[in-house]
Image (cartoon, rainbow, N blue to C red):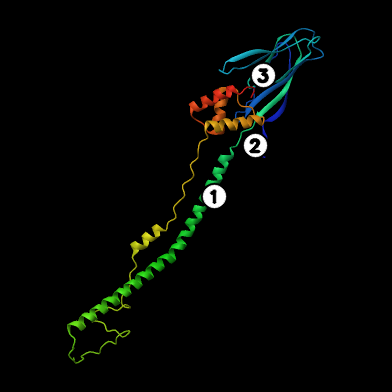
Amino acid sequence: MDMADAGPQTYLYGCELTSGKEVRFAPEEDDVEHQLSIRMVCVDPSTKDDLHLVEVEGVGSEGNKVTAVLAALKPSTTPSVCVGGFEISPPVVFRLKSGTGPVHISGQHLVMMPSFDDEEMEEEEEEEEEEAVVNSLKRMAPAAMRPLKKVKMEEEDEDDDDDDEDDEDDDEDEEEEESPVKPKKTPSKPQTPAQNGKSHKPGTPTAKQKTATPDKKKGNKDAQAFKVPQTPPAARTPPTVADMKAKMMASVQKGVSLPKLQPKFENYMKNTFKVTDSKTIEELWKWRQTVEGK
């Protein structure tokens, strides 16, 4: 199961208040978000039949301290009060404003686990696959270039041989046109036998005597042309405001509570959606305040 779909981790919470004693709830873990949900406030069998006011102190939306009465109890008339999921973010302080106690507070401690964006995980997997393909093509490229160079050199040798034979034929035709009747000459040196029924001019190299030199520059150009282009990584599309609102509403419907303090909400947007624009965060914070009871 994905951690984003698992919802918050829930733990039992309880404390006892007496006269002159405060109870503070302030977890020190910074990498996760904590939430306290109060369910019931009740007196103890040993509590005196006096009016007991339970006071709670927390942080307001502007970062200031806010003090409020959570419950008013009297053992003979109102021994317990169900507050029905009174949620508050730490730090929180409970105390008795009046009465000697003891008074018991019970509820749930919610730990919001960090969420993982499925789209980011998919993009990272795609980038890793593309890098693997590019690396495999790079390893295959040198082996594929060798036969290509060999074929190019053979084609150049054949072209040079054909050009030499055409030049020799043209020279013979010109000699025949200039002197149609050749006078007999006394051979002073043994004549070289003609190859393939063709005679060659003195000093004219044959096709076999010529050694074709491969064009190194052309081979380098072919090697450069054969290089496999690298595929640029796909650009990440930042989520729109509407997409982020939809994802947060989906999380709320699954039971995940959104931060109720603006500093925590800003950290939540930066860590979860990678949003750094202050205007966008301000717009989403105003929208968060319109989501009642979440």
Indicate left or right for 9 with 238 as reference.
right
- Give neighbour class at mark 2: few <14, some 14-19, many 20+ (Cα, 10 Å): few
Q: Quadrant of residue 161?
A: bottom left
Q: Which residue is mark 3?
A: 24
Q: Quadrant of residue 39?
A: top right
Is 179 above or below relative to 131? Answer: below
Give the number of the mark in front: 3 or 2. 2
The mark nearer the N terminus, 1 or 2, is: 2
The residue nearer to you, when weighing 138 against 198, is: 198
Residue ID at (57%, 33%): 272
Q: Residue 62, position in %: x, y?
A: 55, 17
Which quarter of the rendering shows the C terminus? top right
Residue ID at (40%, 60%): 223
Q: Which residue is mark 1?
A: 129
- Give neighbour class at mark 1: few <14, some 14-19, many 20+ (Cα, 10 Å): few
Which quarter of the rendering shows the N terminus? top right
| Observer able to see residue 202 | no
The mark nearer the N terminus, 3 or 2, is: 2
- Count of marks, rendered view: 3
Secondary structure beneath dot 2 equals helix
Indicate left or right for 193 with 254 as reference.
left
The mark nearer the N terminus, 3 or 1, is: 3
Name the mark on residue 3.
Answer: 2
Secondary structure beneath dot 3 equals strand
Residue ID at (66%, 17%): 93
Residue ID at (48%, 59%): 140
